[in-house]
Image (tube, rainbow, N blue to C red):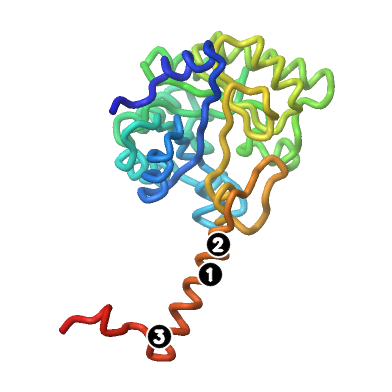
Amino acid sequence: MSKITIQDLLKKKSEQQKITMLTAYDYPFARIIDEAGIDAIIVGDSVAMVVQGLENTLPVTMGEMIYHTKIVSRAVNKAMVIGDLPYMSYQVSIEEAVRNAGRFLKEGGASGVKIEGGAEVADHIRALTKADIPVMAHIGLTPQSIHRMGGYKIQGRTEESAKRLIKEAHIAEDAGAFSVLLEAIPMELAQKITKDLKIPTIGIGAGPYCDGQVLVLHDVIGLFERFLPKFAKRYINMRDEALKAIKTFKEEVEKGIFPSDEHSFK
């Protein structure tokens, strides 16, 4: 079984077939996602919030991201694995960006990386592409910029900001990005960007007109209870099911029901 490649994603766009992506951070869920036939897995810096319990994505380190990417890469047979460059892994210099992005491929087993930003990281994208590191750009709401943006706010609602995002998408494409992730922008703006670009757009809170969609796995399966973004859909409440199972285990142990003869050796 061959892995999904950039060429497969480009072909899907040209044939108007939707691209599917989810985040994953561990072996069991990466296996399930791969078995379900999802095209790509982003090992997102969202691990900081949904796995580590932090308030935002800023504290997660390169070492932690490589750790999780290794595990996910080990689990999949077909899905393309994309490592998410964390805060301060690329901002200091282009040289640092290339070195850290290269670690995702060399140590983490990923097939590409995601980097937040548009025009301000164009030179980074060029350098990464020159080093044979495939890059997904990320524009719109960029969580690593929450302090500058004043929180998690919809982007591109004014004419000026919409024009800026269109320009940034083109800059990312021209710099060599194989895809652009559009986060939390109006769907009409996402539709225009999608039509303008030759490379695929992946939406998260950007409406139905993108070439593909990505969500945080823990939102999809109901394992993150602090909040559910407007753009996310919970397909199952796994947290409640797990809580129910664990409470049943506790009750059975306390009442002497478990372990029974069936679960004991003779």
Q: Residue at x 42, y 20 (%)?
A: 134
- Compared to residue 233, the image places residue 135 above or below, namely above
CB-based contact (under 8 Å), mark 2 and mark 3:
no
Amino acid type shown at disc 1:
Leu
Residue 71 picture location, percent across and down: 34, 45
- The image quarter containing residue 118 is top right
Residue reaching furthest to the right: 158
239 left or right of 153 in image: left
Q: Which residue is mark 1?
A: 243
Q: Quadrant of the N terminus?
A: top left
The residue lying furthest to the bottom in this view is 255
Q: Which residue is mark 2?
A: 239
Q: Secondary structure at mark 3?
A: helix
Q: Residues within 10 Å of mark 1 (few under 14, many from 20)?
A: few
Q: Which residue is mark 3?
A: 253
In 3D space, how far apart are the residues under numbered discs 3 and 1 (Cα atoms)? Answer: 16 Å
- Callouts 1 and 2 close, C-beta under 8 Å: yes
Label 3, residues with CA under 10 Å away: few <14, some 14-19, many ≥20: few
